[in-house]
Each structure stands twice: as C-alpha cells, then as structure tokens.
C-alpha cells in the first residue's frame, strides 16, 4: 500500500484537474462555520477542485472529510454526489478522510453525519456547483442557452437539437474548474431525486462479506514490525523503570520503548511482541486509589471542582412546586459504559526522516495529524493521516490512542510499526461514556397536569476528543506527558438562549428564555442545571453521548408522573408536548404498535411471567431528529430476567437519503441500546478497571432471543435533513424500563437492568405493598 | 521455529514459525488474509473464526502447531465479490452488516450450523451463535440472512 499524492492519484485515475496550491498549512481555525462547516487546510474547502474532479472518462472523484465507519456514509455520500451531478452511482469514486487529499471536516460523528445528514452542505454543495459549472461550459461548447440543456448520465444535451451533446469528460478534459464553491448553486429538491431516497445497497457490502475489504488491521508495509503497549497496572501509576533484560530471551524483540509513562515493545513478529509485552518487567509507582464503586454515585454529588451549566431557569420552580397538589421526586443513575468495539483497535505508522504516515481508524484525521505532530515534535504538514476503517467505534474508542501508540513506536525504531491492542488494552484505553446521577422533581396540579419540572445532574468528565491541540485527552498522549482537559470550577452563567444540545432538558419543558421558547413541551415552570465533575477515568463521546443518560431519566420520570395521576403514558406525553414532529412520531409508534391505552402498571397477572409495554420519545439535541419507541417485554418475576419481544420505532429525520441504510441504523441502534440497558457497565476495584473482556463486560451476543424491530419511517421532504445515527438508541433504556414497570409495577431507576436488580426491585415493591396492606 | 505445512483456501503453505504461534497471526500477518480478525485474542467473540478440517475454530487461541497439515477455510475462501458463496449472497441480499468486522464469526458459524442441520430452528441458531458478537447489533438482518441461506439451500 503506498500513499499517492493527490497529484499522482488524479493522474493515475485519469483525472485532469490537478493543480492546486499546497501552500503552507493555515492555523486550523474553524472558518466559514456558516455555509461550509469546514476548517482551513492546504486543501482549501472554498475551492471546488478540493471536492470534485471529473476524469476524461467521465468518472467523478469526490473528496470528503466524512468517513465510513460502518454507518453507511460511503454509500450515502456517493448517492449524494451522483444525484447532484446526474451521473450513475457506479461512476462516483469517493476518497475519504486522507489529509493529503481531502478537505478538513473535523470529526465524523454519528449525529452529524449519519446517512441522512450529509445533504445540505459541503460535498453536496460542491457537486451542485460542479453541475452548474458543467452546464455553463456545455452552453458555450454547444452554442445553446443553459436553460435549454438537460443532463442525463453525465451527458449534457440541448433540447432543441439532440445532436448537440457533450459528456462531462469531454468538457473538462485538460482543465480544472478553478472556481470557488458556490453558496447559491441550486440543490435538487427531494422531489427530483433519482439516486437519493432509494434503498441503495451498501457499496462496500460484497467486499465485507467476502473478506476482500481492507481494514486497518490488514495494512501491510514492507519491513513492517509489530508493536504492543504496556499500560500501567493501576490507573494513574507512574513509571519507575523497565528491565529490558527481562525480554532478552525472546527472539525477534527489536526495542523496548518508553516515553515518560508510556511503555511499548516492538518485535519482528506479532506473537513476539505480544509475549514481550506480557513478560517485560516494569516497575510502577503510585496510582490506583479508586473510589469504591458502590459509593461512587453518592460521591458524584459532592465532587469538586464543578463546572455548572444552567440550560433554563424560569426562577419560579421552587414556588410552583410548593403550590403543587402533589410533587414526585426520583433519582436516576447511569453507569460508565464502554464503546467496547468488537475489534481491539489497531493502527500502522511509518515515521522516518522527519515524516510520518499513519493509517488510522480515527474519526478525526486532521486532529489526529496535529496530535501526532505534537507527540513527535514534527510540523503538522510532515504528518500524513490516512483513514483506514477499523471495527465500528460508536464514538471515542481506542482508535485515536492506538494511532498515537503506533506513531510513538515507529518513531523509536524508524521503521513501519503495526500496533494491535489487546482486548484488555482496548477496555482500559478507551474513553467511556459519562456516568450520571440525575435528581428530578415534578409538580402536578389538581387536574393532573405537570406544572413544574426541576432537573439537576452530576456527570463526570476527564479528557474528551483530542481535537487539534490536546493529545493528552486520550491515554497515550497523557502517558507521554501531555495534559488532559480537566474540569475547572465554573459557576452557572445566566441563560442567554435555550440550548438543548446534549438533552439535559426534558422534551416536556417549554424552554423559555427571554420570551423565546425553544423546548418541545408545554411546562413553563422549569429549571435544568447540570454539574460537570472530575472523573477518575477518561471519558468521551459514546453514541448519543449524554442523551442516552438524560433521556433515560426524563422518559422514565415522565412515566412515573403518568402513573402517579393514573394516566395513559402516550396520552399523558401528548398532553405535555407541543413540537409537532415529536407528537407525530409518538402517535405513529403507538398506532403501529397497537398501543393498549390505559394507565401503567397493568393489572397484576398470575404466573411468574408478566408482560408489559412502555414508550419513550425524544427530540434529539432539541431539533436533530425525532424518535418514539414502544417496547414490549416479558419479565420473569422469579428470576428477574427480562425478555424484550418487540420494538416499534417511529423515526423522523427529514428527507431520507437511503431508507434501507436508515433502517439498518434504527435496528442496530435499538438493539445496541437494549444491550446497554440490560447489561453494560464498566466496573472497577481499588486499582483499575475490572471489566476487561467479554466475560466481565456484558454485551448481548448474536445468540439471544432477538426481538422484532419494526421501523416506521416518517419521510419529510422540504425540511433540512437531521441526524439518524444516534436517535434510536437514545430512547431504548427508558422504553424498556417503562415496559418493565407496566408489567410488574417495579420501577428500575438504575442502568443496567440486570436480573438481580429487577429481582431486588420486585422484592422491595412486594414488601412495600405488604406494609400498606389493610 | 519449525516448518509447518497447512492448506489454506486450497493453497498449500509451509510456514517457519514457533508452533505456539496463534494460527490467526500466521493467517493475517504471513499469509495476509483479511477474513479472520483480531477481536479479543481470547476466543470469546468469534471475529477470528476459520474452518479447520470441517469444524469452526477460533484461530486466535489455536496454536499453529495443533493444526499441522489441516485444511483451513477462511471467509475469503468461501467465495469472491464476483462469485459469492450462497451464504455470502444471503448476507448481501439482506444487507446484513454495518462495520463488517464480526462477519467471519457470524457467517462461518452459521454456515457450519446449516450445513449440518439444514432446517435449524431459532433456538438452534441462537445456540450456534451464543458466543458470537456483533457490536453494531445487526442481529435482525443477520438472522434473516442465515434463514434465507438455509431456505435457499434446501432442495
């Protein structure tokens, strides 16, 4: 595998649009956030030639900074280019996330780049600009007006004289566009779509199922060595020394590498590196001292420093609660969860002669480029990061950190090095989804209507995505001596505008700030405050980051309120919502599920197995996708075992680019949410994390009783496309929890809903009922 | 080090490695095959699955010395993009993957099941896949693909 320069690549593919300025790297400031949402780099995102090239044979090469992570982006983006340029899908070649070739589009993250959320900007606008430019060129060439030209299959024809025709290849041969990206180039409306909007099969599917697809794990370079890392045995331990003689008897060991607290080994063969990493005698000092896990939630509330964020405050919540006919309050708990990618992360780096090339599964090639540059003391322009797919990441797994590992080890031996993390390395090297404690109070009036909603959360944070200048935000950068982003004390500022980006505010509040109401609901007495506190573990975005946790708390608590006033959970939600799109998905989910309208819990049935149904909904990030899910469950009251029989998911993400791709995301997100709700939890002892393999971190295997997942797709033309990769997962825990309550009358306020926890809740409930019995 | 013979996807190979070397490393590093992948190195997830002498094994925990002379089939040994094996075609028809990293375990375990039990019940499939993980949770599609393969295979 060799890294072609952009120029060589275009020549190799026969494209003739090559020359562009590779002037010095500009500071990676976000510019033009407005129309293009890109960052300045040597591949100037303002220039059409940075995005689209048309070869002499009519092949369209498109350059994108958003990459295929398994979510269908390769296919959706290719559809997008084919659509805007009116060429067959087969004629589009997409080059993804290569810092030598592609514009800087920051990070490819689920909610912003799902199969349906790439329509409006960047690449699509570039393709539309190219179409208009080609029409202009054709008009001159054919002696016709643009208005009378039509395009089909990459050929432009004059309506008045069908012999007047020219292909894209003929038009651009020997030339480049040399045009700025147009902000006014007309985008096709959903009504005109021929390629978009269709259930196009994944372009990479056949290669994946026949194992022809090259993952980063499959990258081989001449003279490549194998590296493994040795992480501290106790979280936060520092390196005293390594005894290199301890691995001298292992054939093929090339070098033991240390850099501050980073330790790794390089060997000729992978098995030798693995053995050396195990056998190397390393002395560490300090570390550990982790808080007992069973006291962790209690401690979160008092941790300092605290960074406080007020999302909304109507300033009358305490008064309204005092006047309310009844007030209910509950605390919800959500653990750290792992991305737990099926493939332990891998990367390959070749660092020699002041230059570095990294084949990386990162979601963020340009930030990784600057992170690697900082680690190696190189200028960023000497680092080339080539996105090469790893296993599904679902956020900040160990992809970034292993890229740093590979760079450090290759740098130390001046030869290409492939680093494979072990399963345990992966579990202790990734950045977990945040743990949360959420207290809520609801005030209810005489009519049973919610009149006040009070929310207060404590959530733990350390590090995050490294971005362009914080390699210490993930473990390798930190071990190598870079600082991590830490929580600093910050009192809550007055709220200027209502921002529900991470969903701390429930869908039922009005979100009124300064006379403008941005919430999806009707409750006008509202206070939402979140305290970010320090975490002992690295944390980072995990699919639907913070939204899964918040929505679990909101939607379970809404169900508690409905049960308190003996209202049907669907009707009660609708009564407090005002966002039409959210209302519509709730109605659609209930209708398709054949919702049995009545209050929860249902009448207790005889026998050990109880069945129930629950609903949960969310306006994702406030306005970035709408979903409502009905879950139908059976609970074995003797064992506490939950079996989910069916999910009905109603989903609205605006105009749908690829309905089958969307369904795949909905089905996968829903079942992943189920696995997270029923079993997933990071565990630890005094020294380190103890959930380190598939025996200690509980993922549902393929061999469980898989529920039916029915998707109801609400397709809306004429509105902007929204995210769809993180919507479905957001509501699953609450939908299941509400169904468990419906079946048994037991409310589970802590994720995961293990059989033991459910059994305990059932016993508590029984005792409570017995105590009140007349 | 010693020379070990094995046949992989119909091709004979002799590799000179320590017999304790996990088969996976030989397949992925020496023979540069892309099917079996490192998922856990513990035999827990299935990503490294290959068929050896007709049985599925976890190549990450199989020392190569224990499969001397074996006939090994990896996921790429079943079929190609142009001529996929019927079970691979069933996965394409059902669009049964997201990241695709787990497919060696899913497809090879399912093939082994259906080849020995042409009409598997849901329970049989669950049992056969009880130690196979897919973290993208493409379960519903994968189960449909497996049933499609079984259905189309029956005379």
Image: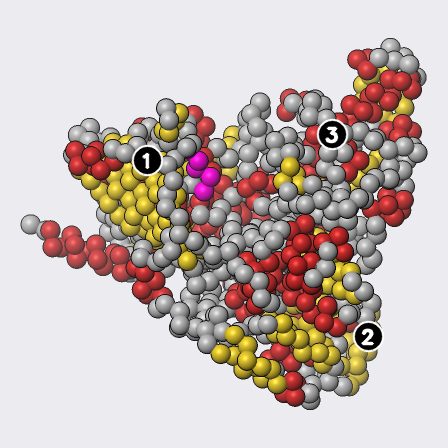
Pointers 3 and 1 within a single chain: yes
Residue A614 visible in the displayed image:
no
- Is residue A90 placed above or below B148 in the rendered structure? above
Residue A299 belongs to magenta span: no
Secondary structure at numbered mark 3: loop
* Both labels 2 and 3 in a single chain: no
Q: Which of marks 3 and 1 is nearer the N terminus?
A: 3
Q: Residue at x 26, y 51 (%)?
A: A746
Q: Tell me the element at label 2.
A: strand
Residue under label 2, please give it: B13
Dots 1 and 2: beta carbons under 8 Å?
A: no
Residue A285, percent from left and from top: 49, 78
Horizontally, is A291 left or right of A706 in the view?
left
Q: Name the residue carrying label 3.
A: A181
- Seen from this angle, which residue lies furthest left? A774
Q: Distance between the residues labelled 2 and 3?
A: 54 Å
> Which chain is indicated by disc 3?
A
Query: Mark 2 Cα within 10 Å, few/some/many (few <14, many 20+)?
Result: some
Q: Do labels 1 and 2 share a chain?
A: no
Left or right: residue A706 versus residue A507 is right
The reply to whether discs 2 and 3 touch (Cβ–Cβ < 8 Å) is no
* Rendered-image quadrant of the N terminus of chain A: bottom right
Q: Give the range drawn in magenta.
A: A498-502
Q: Name the subunit of mark 2.
A: B
Determine whether, in the image, residue A600 is placed left or right of residue B130.
left
| Residue of label 1 | A313
Q: Which of marks 1 and 2 is in front?
A: 1
Residue at 11 percent across and 51 percent down: it is: A772
- Labels 2, 3: front one: 3
Q: Which quadrant of the structure image shows residue B116?
A: bottom right
């Amino acid at each position: 595998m060799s890294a072609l320069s952009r120029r060589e690549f275009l020549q190799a593919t026969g494209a003739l649009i090559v020359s562009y300025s590779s002037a010095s790297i500009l500071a990676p400031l976000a510019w033009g956030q407005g129309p293009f949402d890109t960052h300045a780099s040597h591949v100037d995102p303002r220039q059409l030639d940075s995005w689209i090239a048309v070869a002499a044979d009519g092949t369209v090469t498109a350059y994108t900074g958003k990459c295929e992570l398994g979510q269908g982006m390769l296919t959706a983006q290719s559809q997008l280019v084919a659509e805007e340029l009116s060429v067959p899908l087969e004629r589009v070649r997409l080059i993804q996330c290569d810092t030598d070739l592609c514009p800087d589009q920051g990070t490819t993250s689920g909610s912003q780049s799902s199969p349906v959320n790439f329509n409006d900007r960047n690449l699509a606008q570039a393709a539309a600009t190219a179409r208009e430019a080609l029409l202009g060129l054709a008009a001159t060439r054919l002696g016709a007006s643009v208005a009378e030209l039509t395009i089909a299959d990459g050929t432009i024809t004059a309506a008045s004289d069908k012999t007047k025709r020219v292909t894209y290849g003929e038009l651009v041969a020997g030339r480049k566009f040399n045009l700025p990206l147009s902000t006014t180039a007309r985008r096709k409306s959903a009504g005109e779509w021929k390629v978009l909007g269709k259930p196009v099969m994944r372009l990479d599917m056949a290669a994946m199922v026949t194992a022809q697809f090259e993952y980063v794990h499959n990258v081989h370079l001449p003279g490549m060595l194998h590296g493994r890392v040795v992480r501290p045995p106790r979280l936060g331990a520092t390196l005293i020394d390594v005894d290199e003689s301890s691995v001298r008897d292992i054939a093929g060991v090339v070098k033991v590498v240390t850099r501050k607290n980073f330790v790794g080994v390089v060997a000729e063969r992978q098995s030798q590196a693995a053995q050396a990493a195990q056998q190397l005698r390393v002395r560490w000092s300090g570390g550990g001292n982790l808080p007992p896990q069973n006291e962790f939630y209690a401690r979160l509330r008092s941790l300092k420093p605290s960074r406080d964020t007020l999302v909304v405050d109507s300033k009358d919540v305490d008064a309204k609660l005092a006047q309310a006919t009844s007030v209910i309050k509950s605390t919800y708990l959500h653990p750290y969860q792992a991305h737990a990618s099926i493939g332990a992360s891998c990367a390959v780096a070749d660092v020699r002669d002041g230059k570095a090339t990294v084949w990386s599964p990162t979601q963020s090639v340009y930030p990784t480029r600057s992170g690697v540059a900082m680690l190696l003391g190189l200028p960023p322009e000497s680092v080339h990061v080539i996105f090469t797919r790893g296993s599904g990441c679902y956020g900040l797994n160990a992809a970034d950190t292993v890229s740093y590992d590979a760079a450090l080890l290759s740098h130390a031996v001046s030869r290409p090095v492939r680093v494979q993390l072990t399963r345990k390395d992966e579990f202790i090297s990734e950045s977990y989804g945040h743990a949360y404690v959420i207290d809520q109070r609801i005030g209810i009036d005489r009519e049973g209507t919610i009149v006040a909603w009070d929310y207060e959360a404590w959530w733990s944070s350390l590090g995050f995505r490294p971005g362009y200048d914080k390699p210490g935000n993930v473990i390798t950068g930190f071990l190598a001596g870079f600082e991590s982003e830490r929580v600093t004390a910050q009192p809550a500022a007055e709220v200027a505008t209502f921002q529900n980006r991470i969903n701390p505010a429930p869908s039922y509040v009005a979100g009124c700030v300064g006379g403008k109401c941005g919430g999806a609901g009707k409750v006008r007495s509202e206070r939402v405050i979140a305290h970010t506190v320090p975490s002992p573990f690295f944390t980072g975005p995990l699919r639907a980051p913070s939204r899964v946790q918040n929505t679990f708390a909101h939607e379970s608590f809404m169900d508690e309120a409905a049960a308190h006033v003996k209202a049907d959970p669907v009707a009660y939600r609708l009564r407090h919502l005002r966002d039409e799109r959210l209302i519509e998905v709730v109605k659609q989910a209930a209708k398709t599920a054949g919702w049995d309208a009545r209050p929860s819990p249902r009448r207790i049935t005889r026998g050990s197995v109880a069945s129930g149904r629950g609903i949960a909904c969310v306006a994702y990030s406030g306005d970035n996708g709408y979903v409502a899910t009905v879950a139908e469950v059976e609970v074995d009251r003797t064992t506490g075992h939950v079996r989910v029989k069916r999910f009905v998911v109603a989903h609205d993400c605006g105009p749908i680019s690829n309905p089958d791709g969307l369904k795949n995301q909905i089905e996968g997100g829903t079942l992943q949410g189920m696995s997270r709700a029923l079993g997933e939890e990071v565990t630890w002892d005094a020294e380190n994390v103890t959930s380190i393999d598939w025996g200690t971190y509980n993922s549902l295997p393929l061999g469980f009783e898989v529920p039916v997942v029915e998707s109801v797709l609400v397709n809306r033309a004429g509105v902007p496309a929204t995210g769809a990769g993180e919507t479905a997962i957001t509501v699953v825990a609450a939908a299941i929890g509400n169904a468990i309550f419906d079946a048994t009358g037991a409310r589970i306020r802590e994720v995961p809903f293990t059989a033991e926890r459910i059994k305990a809740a059932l016993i508590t409930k029984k005792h409570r009922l017995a105590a009140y019995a007349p | 080090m010693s020379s070990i013979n094995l046949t992989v996807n119909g091709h004979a190979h002799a590799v000179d490695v320590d017999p304790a070397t996990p088969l996976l490393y030989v397949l992925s590093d020496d023979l540069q095959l892309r099917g079996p992948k490192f998922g856990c190195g513990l035999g827990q997830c299935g990503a490294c699955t290959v068929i050896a002498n007709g049985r599925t094994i976890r190549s990450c925990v199989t020392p190569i010395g224990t499969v001397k002379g074996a006939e090994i089939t990896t996921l790429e040994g079943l079929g190609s993009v142009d001529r996929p094996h019927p079970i691979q075609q069933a996965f394409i028809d059902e669009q049964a993957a997201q990241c695709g990293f787990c497919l060696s375990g899913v497809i090879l375990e399912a093939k082994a099941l259906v080849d020995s039990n042409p009409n598997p019940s849901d329970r049989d499939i669950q049992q056969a896949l009880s130690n196979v993980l897919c973290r993208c949770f493409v379960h519903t599609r994968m189960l449909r693909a497996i049933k499609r393969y079984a259905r189309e295979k029956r005379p």
